[in-house]
Image (cartoon, rainbow, N blue to C red):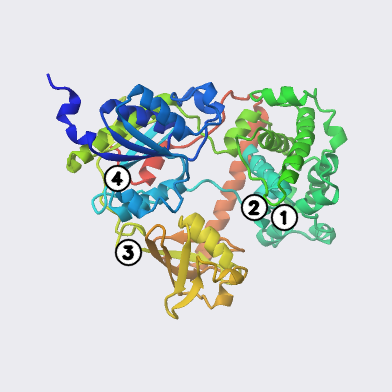
Amino acid sequence: MPCWTEDHKKIQTTKVLVVGAGGIGCELLKNLAATGFKHVHVIDLDTIDVSNLNRQFLFRKEHVSSSKAEIATRVIKKFNPDINLTFDHSSIFEERFNIAFYGNFDIVLNALDNKQARNHVNRMCHSARTPLVESGSAGFFGQVQVILKDKTECYECQEKPKQKTFPGCTIRNTPSEHIHCTVWAKHVFSQLFGEVDIDDDVSPDLKAEEAEHPEADSQDDEAAKEPVPIGTRQWAEGVNFDAEQIFNKLFVQDIHYLLKINHLWKTRKPPTPLSFSDALKLGDSLPFSESQKNQTSVWSIATCVKMFEACIQELKKEANANPDEPLSFDKDHPIIMSFVAACANVRAHIFNIPTKSAFEIKAMAGNIIPAIASTNAIVAGMIVTEAVKIIEGREDEVKNSVIMAKPTTRGQVFMFANTNKPNPRCYVCSDTKEVFLYVNLAEMTLSGFCEKVLKQELNMLAPDAVESNTNSIVLSSDGETDPLMSKKLAELSIMDGSILACDDFMQDFDVKVFVCKNSNFKGDQFEIVREMKKPVDKEEDEEKKSEEENKKEDEDRRKRKVEEQSTKVDDEPEIKRNRVEEVQAQGIEVME
């Protein structure tokens, strides 16, 4: 009786590129080797962390800190010596991984964990006309999407749910949930030791409150007369990063300043300033080393203060060791994460919000959804199933696959969905490559347009931009326009109705950006949409905004009541997402 590989001989000559050697990647490489694939190349920049060992089964304790791609290749070759498996311990964004590189492969299988890399591989495969099988998992939810140029939707055909953000004034002035305190603590870290971003300032924001509450009573004039709190980095440098003085600045001086803004506390419980010396009296203080090990219990405020003090000194040393390179937030850096956890809990205590364990705070700070090994294994199996269909020319049989986090009414958790045709409004794979940018032209800088709009939102690597009407160069990736980066868009004669032809040579990607004026936006704030908005009646818009604000305030009050009545702390982080909505948002019609 012939073996399976004899009936599927084509897979033995197929050249496969695997991008990612993590949770799904480990399972995928094992499946490819077991299925009979002979020519596989894997790319991954990451190294092995202790936390990977509970689900990435190719790795062992002795492999910690080694390259994932290298160790996975070594272990798989022991498992199947006949496989021609090669690797690159590199970033997928490197120039050598160009369109010609992707064109060398018959199929690309994605096992990535971030949107930016997924978008990039999607565009490279589209330009190289190489079939792509996209995948992802989040807890018990998993999915696989087949992407064939001109036949199915690409990864960017449908807008993905955006990561939840919070208004700056909520973070700086009126936190009502622990996530607000966690985001604020991450900003404190960046202001002290990272790359300073004016949008991430942690001092009370009086200007935002004045803009949102022009009716505020005259008593608030007292706050306006007070000197505005000094910037965090400037303050810290002035006191040589003295932990006690920084603590008192953040949790005493800034809080006193907030309390003077009377209208903030008409319907909210006001915060209580807390000094360094008083905080040390709130509970037993654990030694630093013991606190570091105790991640699942809620630290006392006294322990948080000691942790705050110790972490500042350690981070100061680390920053001084390489003064030209600011530190960056890393959820897996124990000192950084301990600092954020301690800082967030002290702020939560001051604002009468229940504190959480370092484990829970890490989950929120890193937007972590616990990985499930069995989900990754099922996803990897689905990837190979669809890959075999494509390789053998059975493209009419391919399906998108979905694992639901909870069973349907029929008791199903594993389902298939038909692939969708390309979105005619997609700015990546359609003939209509255009988006509409709503922005305050008098406030957004060319730097903001380049970094936040083109690179972050539209995922370009080295963008160029030309104003279509005048054919003048607005942005050049070779540095020609660097002296103009601080200029406002209006100063560069970009106006309402301007059309910017933007392109990225590395990705062979181009898109037209239609500029639309929105004077309500501040600084580099913007909105990207795929179709121009219809004009909105001003009165209706104001009524809608008022209703939304009232709803938000009612919801905040309700949440605070629930949290105050409950002292229970879960063993796992509270991470809530509606997976079905995410599947629908990605344009996948689930079939039962």
The residue that disc 2 covers is 168
The Cα atoms of the two marked residues, 3 and 4, are separated by 28 Å
> Can you tell which mark lies on residue 432?
3
> Disc 1 or 4, which lies upstream in sequence?
4
Three-letter amino acid code of the residue under disc 2: Gly
User: How many neighbours does mark 1 have within 10 angstroms: few (below 14), some (14-19), or many (20 or more)?
Assistant: some
Tag 3 secondary structure? loop
**Residue at point 47%, 67% (across, down):** 464
Three-letter amino acid code of the residue under disc 3: Thr
**Residue at point 68%, 53% (across, down):** 196
The Cα atoms of the two marked residues, 2 and 1, are separated by 8 Å
Q: In the current view of this chain or complex, which residue is farthest to the right? A: 277
Residue 90, percent across and down?
Answer: 47, 43
> Disc 3 or 4, which lies upstream in sequence?
4
User: How many neighbours does mark 2 have within 10 angstroms: few (below 14), some (14-19), or many (20 or more)?
Assistant: some
Q: Are marks 2 and 1 in contact (CB under 8 Å)?
A: yes
The Cα atoms of the two marked residues, 2 and 3, are separated by 35 Å
The residue that disc 4 covers is 105
The answer to whether residue 581 is seen in the rendering is: yes
> Can you tell which mark lies on residue 423?
none
The Cα atoms of the two marked residues, 1 and 4, are separated by 53 Å
Tag 1 secondary structure? loop
Residue 104, percent across and down?
Answer: 30, 48
Decide if residue 541 is on the left or right side of residue 567: left
The answer to whether residue 22 is seen in the rendering is: no
Which residue occupies the foreground of this view, 410 or 552?
Answer: 410
The residue that disc 1 covers is 205
Three-letter amino acid code of the residue under disc 4: Phe
- Select label 2 or label 4 by which is in front: 4
Which residue occupies the foreground of this view, 51 or 405?
Answer: 51
